[in-house]
Image (tube, helix red, strand yellow):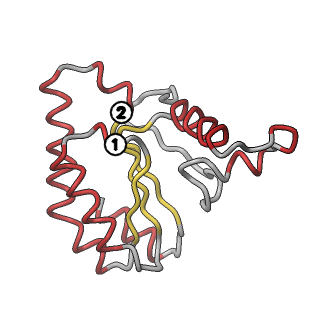
Amino acid sequence: MHTTVEHLVAREIKYLTVWGFSTDNWRRSGSEVNNLFQLLAAWIEKDTLWVHRQGVRLRHIGHLEELPQDLQVAINKAIELTSDNTGMTFTLAFNYSGRAEIVDAARQLIADNYPLHILDEHAFSRHLYTDGMPDVDLVIRTAGEVRLSN
């Protein structure tokens, strides 16, 4: 990940999103899920200061509240440490689902009593987790998969 971040920062790329854990991953075995949690926790512990020194701002999208408490704390500390950085925004999609994001946006619009007769794509996009971020330019799918995740 260091090489990727270094190259993107050097090229003044402003946004990187890495999808580390889909909500569909909860269907995997408990040990596999725990291993993914441990991988993220280790990455945060090992690399947060390095990312901070690169001027990168970390954010999270997805349902953080469903993750183990210690992982929530680690993610929030990393976000807080890097919150004032103005370089690239590195978004970690962990326990994320595009469908859940759409449902959450719709629920927020309803909770806000948003007038449906004026609802448009722009108004809807302001309620997405990715509000303030540009649309995706490039998706790289690893492991030879040819499908998009949820």
Work out how far the residue at label 1 is from the one at label 2, CA to CA, in angstroms: 13 Å
The quadrant where residue 120 appears: top right
The quadrant where residue 131 appears: bottom right
Q: Residue at x 22, y 74 (%)?
A: 49
Q: Position of residue 35 (x, y in %)?
A: 14, 36
Q: Residue at x 15, y 61 (%)?
A: 45
* Crowd around label 2: few <14 · some 14–19 · many ≥20 (10 Å): few
- Disc 2 target residue: 143
Name the outermost residue toward the right.
117
Q: Residue at x 29, y 19 (%)?
A: 27
Reply above or below: 34 against 80.
Answer: above
Residue 130 in the figure: left or right of residue 97:
right
Residue 90 in the figure: left or right of residue 130:
left
Reply above or below: 47 against 128.
Answer: below
- Disc 1 target residue: 20
Towards the viewer: 43 or 12: 43
Towards the viewer: 9 or 69: 69
Q: Nearer the viewer, mark 1 or mark 2?
A: 1
The quadrant where residue 118 appears: top right
Q: Position of residue 103 (x, y in %)?
A: 57, 32
